[in-house]
Amino acid sequence: MKRENITAYAILGLLHHEPMTGYDLKKRFENTIGHFWPAGFGQIYPALGGLAREGLIAGRAEEGKTGLAKTVYTLTEAGRAALQRWLAVPAAKEHVRYEILLKLFFGALAPPEQNVQTIREFRRRYERALAVLDGFEADLRRVLNESEDHLYYLLTVRFGQRVYGAYLAWADEALALLAGRNKETGA
Amino acid sequence: MKRENITAYAILGLLHHEPMTGYDLKKRFENTIGHFWPAGFGQIYPALGGLAREGLIAGRAEEGKTGLAKTVYTLTEAGRAALQRWLAVPAAKEHVRYEILLKLFFGALAPPEQNVQTIREFRRRYERALAVLDGFEADLRRVLNESEDHLYYLLTVRFGQRVYGAYLAWADEALALLAGRNKETGA
DNA sequence: GCCACCATGTAAACAGTTACATGATTAG
DNA sequence: CTAATCATGTAACTGTTTACATGGTGGC
């Protein structure tokens, strides 16, 4: 079973919206799909090379800010077709890896205070992340009727909000459970 | 910044509980930590070799079912120390990758029915997964006082239940949003 | 006789991360 | 003058997944 480079399809999708340079794509990843599908320069540039060789995108040299060379990539018809074919294939199972749960699973081996700190830090992190998504949601709701795309963007943001919300609720529950246990042993 | 093989620490953690073969470890992964930190044979066996070479675990040959050769690995004192040191290091950021969100992000390019099917299939999958975790929770609550470990196991199960619950709630919301949009355009 | 399970490993391919390397422009 | 931003790439490494390879035991 061959795996197709999903990140390359993510690039095709972003280029469907508008032509961009590799650098632009990186930023686009960072504040949109990077939340659930991150990509760095080390993946983007090689992928662009491959896609261009396959004829799914076409690069043309342009001048950037005051004479700097840059390459702007445009989706070709073949690329558009490949993107649509990929969209029709059912998505593979999500894959998630939580190092924090691994450490917590072996939590009985660590000082209780350490586990509490770990969870608190986790909670703080996602409190901030949730606030960012709340901002996205407000922006999207404002322009919801301007493009069909916005509804789909909103769906992905709502997903993140729900999941981060679950993280926060879990953290509170976990801290309460650990506090209860400590009180018991302390008494 | 060198990365240390986290899966190897997961193995140390499992061996802390009791000595096991590589095959046993695989099964242990499958029905415990594999939910948030999966590992296959292709990772487990090489990792065991490395850990043994470093002296963090010790393997001894035994006879399995009716004379079949097998190697049972035990955590050494050095291994126990390494595990505890690792537990004290703050966990790296979670990493999650959702192909389904990527496809949904570009959902405007696909037939609406396709997006609906994708979400429905996702929902079914996690409905089943949540039921499994509910079973785990019930089992753990029953034996909660028998070992301190059980409280920590419960924390990881509760995490999964919260997150899968969020998935289901999101799927319902997403389907409602898409249905609303279709009705609008259909009218 | 066949399938599931026990048991161990290797090899190849692929994906992803990090570091290295270069260089111009602009805003403070 | 310095940091941030624009801009492009390569190289090395690590981790993960998949396929290959082998073979005995036990139940149906």
Image (tube, coloured by chain):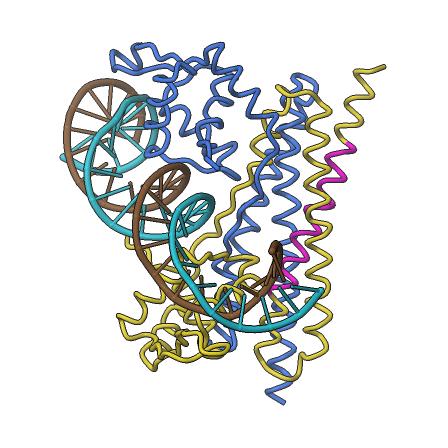
Chain colours: A yellow, B blue, C cyan, D brown
Tell which of A142 and D5 is nearer to you. Answer: D5
Residue A17 screen position, x and y as percent: 49, 78
Q: Position of residue B27 (x, y in %)?
A: 42, 29
Q: Which residues are magenta?
A: A156-176
Residue B111 can be seen, yes or no: no
| Residue A61 shown in magenta | no
The residue nearer to you, when weighing B141 against A108, is A108
Residue drawn at 47 percent across, 32 percent down: B6
**Which residue is at 63% across, 57% downward?**
A160
Between C16 and B117, the residue placed more toward the observer is C16
- In the figure, residue A69 lies in which quadrant? bottom left
Vertical position of residue B93 compared to residue B42: above or below: below
Do we see residue A32 in this rendering? Answer: yes
* Residue A165 belongs to magenta span: yes
Q: Is residue A62 left or right of residue B63?
A: right
Residue B59 coordinates in the image, percent (x, y) = 35, 13
